[in-house]
Image (cartoon, rainbow, N blue to C red):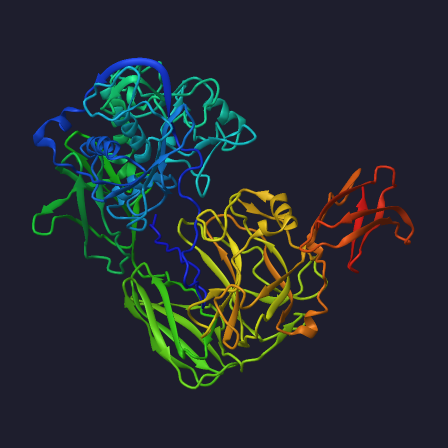
């Protein structure tokens, strides 16, 4: 099969955030493996491996860079000693960044640690659709896969424990916990002695990270009968059957390499009859590997006086099986050819952690299936450090092939890893496959720019000859330009002059391949992409818009003005639901900019009604915190393009109880599927100069922005009845917004709950339940001086049907809801 290269394009809108660091979800696994503190005394010392102790072996093949928070000098010295042991046991061309914190943990926990991220299907991944801990993924890829300063491992160690021994000699007192041992244990988890299995709230067994694919460690877990836990034909993901295996009392790590290291047995995993979060699955079995056993480091607990400075053969065998000992075969897949006689040269580079047996580097190919395959020994060229072989061509057809090599220990590696089930192929003969184009269409060009930048990815089985753009301005004569190939993508900049607000540009991309057929592909397949030229209007003192009619007053590639289900009138809407980037550190900005600059007045107000159903942050998080997830924000700028500053801090669904309750009422996976409606409208008023970012007399541009961080999302944002410094229109705004009142459940069976979370005190409130003909069936009056109130009505004696709940406030406000009695 062809290996298809894909690129995740981060959505970049025409304007992005300035002046703040964007938030992102924490990368650490929700339930990291822990090391428990055993109260038992096991005064015993297992020294470091021989290769660490031999001075000649002190040259390390890996670098672990630790960022310490809160550690004493004594603790850092012991920590560095443990790091040095691991650096002598693993190999990686990529620096491993670790973040270690001296933290307050539960008394019975010595530390916890996990990879900061998991990646699948990266360049160099041995197996498809399995998540690898990022440090291992980077080792296999041979390059950094996150930002250079991002941690690959995140760990915490218990600052509440006063019984730490920070010596490195293994002479741990019987009333102390050996810090070196705990650090070694936790780094083991961070490097990959962990996976993605967990217990759900419904006591089901499950696994997954971004998708429901398992971790690489999980792939090797088997039960007593030798059945794989990730075999969904036996144990479906999110099932009681899988959770039964978690609590089966017997699991093993199916490592063929470990058999030779452990006298013909697989490493036994910790799987107690009652699942223990943070301990089950991702530790070695404590009863199998007692405190004096050479494999006891990665058991769930460490006892007093116990010093283990060697991961042990079982752990190292597990690491080798997952890929920490690896032979990497690199090869650029052959492109198809129309030449039916000339052989093709196959190039490969091979790097082995345990030394390469160059006589085993082979090209295996077939014209049918691999039961009838031929093998060619590849030749090594010292000057290029490459292996080559000539693949014979004997006419038209398909040739399938893969590469294989063995290290000096006899372990065989293949590329693709799952060959011959997976393989490379090359088609020989007249080309019949046109190119493919990937392009993120440009929708808006600012009047002040005049330069349209285009970029695209174009691929072809034979090769791409050229990529062109056809374009016209305001439907005038069509012109053509070539896109240049730079760093793997095609790009060009079209320069215009004199474009003004309302002008438009049409364009399409044409990719032509290098075959004799000169096959081509158009994008879009029919018609053209349209770019609208947008400009700003003259400054104004006031502005208002009820969004009941279409309007060209806003620049936006994502927001739109329209009437949505659940609303009586038009509004300015974000996408519903808005999307989230499905990768760590990614973010989307959805933006709408008012074309009218506003001349600020002293204490000028901006007012609008809104519904905000975006992912709420952690309890207690405030705007700017790392755990303040998605948010909406209103910002101003002096030039309309740069230095956007908040008019008010960003906020989310936690800003109002009705929004928060609605958002959380329908959670599917990580996302909220709750839909906004008119009853959730809340009025917001903002003093345009109140936070000091701008002052009276300045002219500012105003934009509305919804920020989305990775993974979780919701319905989005709706804005209506926008009023800026227009006191006459502002006086007509409702004093009580519908969304300040939460009424549930509706439909109701017995008790109807009414909660108010008003921004101002309404005084007395009269409640009444009325029939469809207006007859008052029940009535109550309460004092609403605090702005927050709660009341109930008993519907259990009323017949099924439709009723009206009417709230009349002392300050003149009125709110009503239609109630359905089931």
The structure residue drawn at horizontal position 61% and vertical position 76%, both measured from the top left corner, is 542
- Give the camera-side residue of 628 and 564: 628
| Left or right of residue 223: residue 549 | right
Quarter of the view holding residue 352: top left
Image height check: is 210 above or below 632? Answer: above
Q: Quadrant of the C terminus?
A: top right
Quarter of the view holding residue 112: top left
Residue 708 visible in the current orientation: yes
Image height check: is 105 above or below 417? Answer: above
Question: Residue 465 location in percent, x, y?
Answer: 29, 68
- The number of discs equals 0
| Left or right of residue 408: residue 223 | right
The structure residue drawn at horizontal position 31% and vertical position 20%, both measured from the top left corner, is 266
Question: Residue 319 location in percent, x, y?
Answer: 27, 31
Image height check: is 269 above or below 670? Answer: above
| Left or right of residue 220: residue 590 | right
| Left or right of residue 35: residue 334 | left
The structure residue drawn at horizontal position 32% and vertical position 49%, both measured from the top left corner, is 146
Quarter of the view holding residue 814: bottom right
Question: Residue 129 location in percent, x, y?
Answer: 39, 41
- Give the camera-side residue of 79 and 449: 79
Question: Residue 456 location in percent, x, y?
Answer: 37, 65
- Give the camera-side residue of 327 and 730: 730
Residue 398 visible in the current orientation: no
């Amino acid at each position: 099969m062809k290996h298809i290269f894909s690129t995740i394009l981060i959505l970049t809108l025409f304007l992005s955030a300035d002046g703040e660091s964007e938030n992102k979800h924490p990368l650490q696994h929700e339930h990291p493996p822990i090391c428990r503190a055993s109260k038992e005394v096991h005064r015993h010392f297992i020294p470091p491996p021989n290769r660490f102790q031999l001075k000649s072996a002190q040259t390390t093949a890996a670098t672990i860079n630790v960022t310490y928070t809160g550690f004493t000098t004594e603790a850092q010295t012991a920590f560095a000693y443990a790091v040095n042991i691991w650096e002598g046991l693993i190999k990686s061309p990529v620096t491993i960044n670790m973040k270690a914190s001296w933290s307050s943990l539960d008394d019975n926990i010595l530390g916890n640690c996990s990879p900061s991220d998991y990646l699948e299907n990266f360049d160099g991944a041995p197996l498809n659709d399995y998540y690898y801990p990022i440090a291992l993924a980077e080792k296999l890829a041979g390059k950094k896969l996150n930002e250079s300063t991002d941690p690959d491992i995140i760990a915490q160690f218990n600052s509440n424990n006063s019984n730490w021994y920070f010596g490195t000699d293994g002479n741990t007192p019987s009333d102390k916990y050996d810090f070196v041992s705990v650090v070694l244990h936790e780094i083991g988890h961070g490097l990959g002695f962990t996976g993605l299995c967990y217990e759900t709230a419904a006591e089901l067994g499950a696994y997954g990270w971004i998708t429901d694919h398992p971790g690489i460690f999980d792939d090797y877990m088997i039960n007593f009968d030798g059945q794989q836990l990730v075999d969904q034909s036996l144990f479906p993901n999110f099932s009681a059957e899988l959770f039964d295996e978690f609590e089966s009392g017997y699991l093993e790590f199916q490592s063929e390499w470990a058999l030779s290291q452990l006298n013909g047995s697989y490493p036994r995993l910790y799987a107690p009859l009652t699942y223990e979060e943070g301990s089950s699955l991702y530790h070695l079995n404590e009863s199998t590997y007692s405190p004096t056993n050479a494999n006891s480091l990665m058991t769930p607990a460490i006892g007093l006086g116990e010093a283990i400075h060697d991961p042990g053969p079982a752990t190292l065998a597990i690491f080798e099986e997952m890929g920490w000992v690896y032979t990497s075969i690199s090869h650029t897949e052959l492109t198809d050819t129309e030449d039916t006689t000339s052989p093709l040269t196959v190039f490969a580079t091979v790097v082995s952690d345990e030394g390469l047996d160059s006589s085993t580097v082979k090209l295996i190919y077939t014209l049918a299936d691999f039961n009838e395959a031929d093998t060619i020994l590849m030749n090594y060229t010292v000057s290029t450090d490459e292996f080559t072989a000539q693949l014979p061509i004997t006419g038209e057809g398909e040739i399938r092939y893969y590469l294989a090599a063995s290290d000096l220990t006899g372990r065989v590696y293949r590329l693709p890893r799952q060959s011959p089930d997976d393989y490379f192929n090359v088609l020989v003969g007249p080309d019949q496959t046109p190119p493919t184009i990937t392009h993120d269409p440009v929708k808006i060009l600012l009047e002040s720019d005049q330069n349209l930048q285009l970029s695209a990815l174009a691929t072809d089985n034979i090769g791409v000859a050229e990529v062109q753009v056809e374009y016209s301005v305001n439907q005038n004569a069509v012109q053509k330009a070539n896109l240049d190939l730079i760093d793997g993508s095609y790009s060009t900049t079209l320069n215009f002059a004199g474009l003004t607000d309302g002008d438009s540009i049409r364009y399409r991309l044409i990719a032509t391949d290098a075959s004799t057929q000169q096959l081509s592909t158009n994008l879009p397949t029919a018609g053209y992409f349209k770019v609208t030229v947008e400009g700003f209007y003259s400054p104004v003192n006031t502005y208002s818009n009820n969004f009941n009619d279409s309007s060209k007053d806003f620049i936006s590639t994502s927001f739109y003005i329209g009437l949505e289900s659940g609303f009586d009138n038009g509004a300015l809407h974000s996408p519903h639901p808005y999307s989230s980037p499905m990768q760590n550190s990614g973010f989307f900005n959805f933006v709408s900019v008012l074309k009218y600059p506003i001349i600020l007045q002293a204490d000028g107000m901006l007012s609008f009604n809104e519904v905000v159903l975006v992912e709420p942050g952690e309890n207690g998080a405030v705007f700017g915190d790392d755990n303040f997830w998605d948010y909406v924000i209103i910002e101003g700028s002096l030039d309309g393009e740069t230095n956007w500053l908040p008019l008010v801090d960003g906020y989310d669904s936690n800003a109002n109880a009705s929004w928060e309750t609605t958002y959380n009422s329908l959670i599917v996976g990580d996302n909220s599927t709750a839909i906004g409606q008119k009853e959730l409208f809340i009025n917001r008023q903002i003093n345009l100069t109140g936070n000091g970012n701008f002052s009276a007399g300045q002219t500012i541009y105003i934009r509305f922005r919804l920020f989305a961080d990775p993974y979780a999302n919701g319905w989005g944002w709706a804005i209506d009845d926008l009023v800026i410094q227009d006191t006459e229109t502002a006086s007509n705004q409702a004093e009580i917004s519908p969304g300040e009142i939460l009424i549930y459940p509706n439909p109701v069976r017995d008790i109807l709950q009414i909660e108010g979370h008003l921004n101002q005190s309404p005084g007395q409130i009269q409640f009444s339940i009325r029939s469809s003909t207006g007859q008052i069936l029940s009535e109550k009056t309460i004092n609403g001086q605090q702005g927050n109130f709660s009341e109930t009505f008993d519907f259990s004696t009323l017949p099924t049907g439709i009723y009206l709940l009417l709230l009349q406030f002392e300050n003149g406000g009125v709110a009503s809801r239609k109630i359905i009695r089931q």
